[in-house]
Image (cartoon, grey):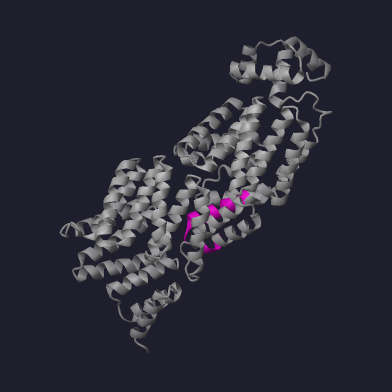
Amino acid sequence: MEDSTGDLARGREHYRLKAWGEAYTSLTRADGRSPLGAEDLELLAVSAYLVGRDGEYLDALDHAYRAHLAASRSARAARCAFWIGLRFLLRGEAGRATAWHARAGRLLEHESSECVERGYMLLPVAEQRLRSGDTQGAFSIAGAAANTGERSGEEDLVAIARHLQGRARLHEGRVKEGLALLDETMLAVTSGELSPIPTGLLYCSIVECCRSVHALERAREWTAALARWCDGQPEMVSFTGACRVHRAEVLQLGGDWSAAIDEARRARERAATDRPSAAEAAYQLGEISRLRGEQAAAEAWFLSANEEGREPQPGLALLRLAQGRVGAAVAALRRVVGGTADPLVRTRLLPAYVEILLAGGKVEEARAASDELQAIAQRFETGVLCALALQARGTVELAEGNATAALDLVRRAWSIWAEMEAPYQAAQARLVTGLACRALGDDEGGRLELEAARRMFAKLGAAPDAAHVDSLARLDSSRRPHGLTPRELEVLRLVAAGKTNKAIAAALRLSEKTVDRHVSSILGKLHVPSRAAATAFAYEHELV
């Protein structure tokens, strides 16, 4: 039988060539024949991690830790303990993570202050500060870790620390500074200066950071870079599920829904040991199915995402809205929004919340949600957040009868969506633009906008939206001689019943100021001088 020497040599060579599966097999075989040394155990650990063998990764790193201890290499043992603790932390096992990091800390008590491993041990401290909301403390501690890494020439440490500083700045709303730090980190990541596991972790984290602040141009750029990195290592399993999820999101935003579905399905196939990516892929499949009108498939995917640990909102609530279950949609999103404190997470919920509240006739609540979204957009100042806020405000203004303001807002939103090459969102903006034009009496302009929106929806495969536009188009001027919005019709009927503005406000749960604006809009659209004349118009045209 061949001894372990050949397997070990092959394992090292496969590792050098990034043939992770072959490296794992050869190194495992070599270890079985003759226990590997600590350095080769570390190679085995990395190979195991990259082919998705999480348990074997931890076992090999544990053996490397003990081998370093036996050889009195305390600092190297501490580094192994750090990575073991980090893996447990990423898995959500805080107790084990803390225990391993405590071991590492004790091992470093007698090492010099310039020991690079001391810099690594600052990273979980910075992470903890960040999660507790102490962004300045996290930034300072990560800065100290980066300085240690720079003095020691440890590129992995520098990159991870700078990335933590970038995240801290993003959490503070200092988006420009935060993205600049993440861009600096990505220079090291994309140039191949880092070892494999930090490279993959940073790719995924930074793409997610860009998504969280809606910096979609950067998310697209770094997702493409991540895809090239993954494609260059066909035997790699880790990180590929997350990569395909990000690809699916980019493709969906760009309007290539069929390709997005393919990527999301592949993500689930490659994410056997990555439940968050599998759950995110299921949610993505649910969203595209919902937009296509495939309600049964959408429901199944949203339920799968929920079972795998991903909150299925706001997609499931929007599905309920499409099913006509408005009360269920409002209740579901009200629960999730009420239980979510992070402003950036709330931005993923608030646009849908505004839409659903308006469908339920809860205009004042929708206005409050829209105002909150605007405040967050002003704090974080990214183009997509601005577009989301403009569009939400525009739909609320239209519901309140202020079509002129609505038109200005949604046109500005459309301009951003068009520049971002986000066709579905652009079509939604054109739909609201068409409705605003009609409310202002510009039937031809409204028709042109609605036709443009319908063409875009049809091209995307958004059958429910295209059908909705068709139903709106059938409401021609012969059936809408008044040009009033549904909310204005409600107000007119109460005016005709002799209600004061104060009484109307109480009945519809609106402010008196909003009712005053509705009444002024009604008089203008009907070309009548008074409430009495508006009442006569309502009876003449059988609106009451």
Q: In the figure, 535 relative to 370: above or below?
A: above
What secondary structure predominates along the stretch shown in magenta? helix
Quadrant of the image containing the C terminus: top right
Q: Write down the region rendered in magenta.
A: 268-287
Residue at the spot x=25%, y=61% of the render?
152
The picture quadrant where one finds residue 110 is: bottom left
> Is residue 98 visible in the rendered structure shown here?
no
Instruction: From the viewer's perspective, tell me whether residue 331 is left or right of residue 128.
Output: right
Q: In the figure, 216 relative to 2: above or below?
A: above
Residue toward you, 496 or 164: 164
Task: Pinpoint residue 16: horizontal percent, then vertical percent.
Answer: 39, 75
Residue at the spot x=45%, y=56% of the render?
204
Residue toward you, 464 or 2: 464
Q: In the figure, 478 relative to 526: above or below?
A: below
> Is residue 152 visible in the rendered structure shown here?
yes
Residue at the spot x=63%, y=40% of the render?
414
Q: Is 317 part of what is drawn in magenta? A: no
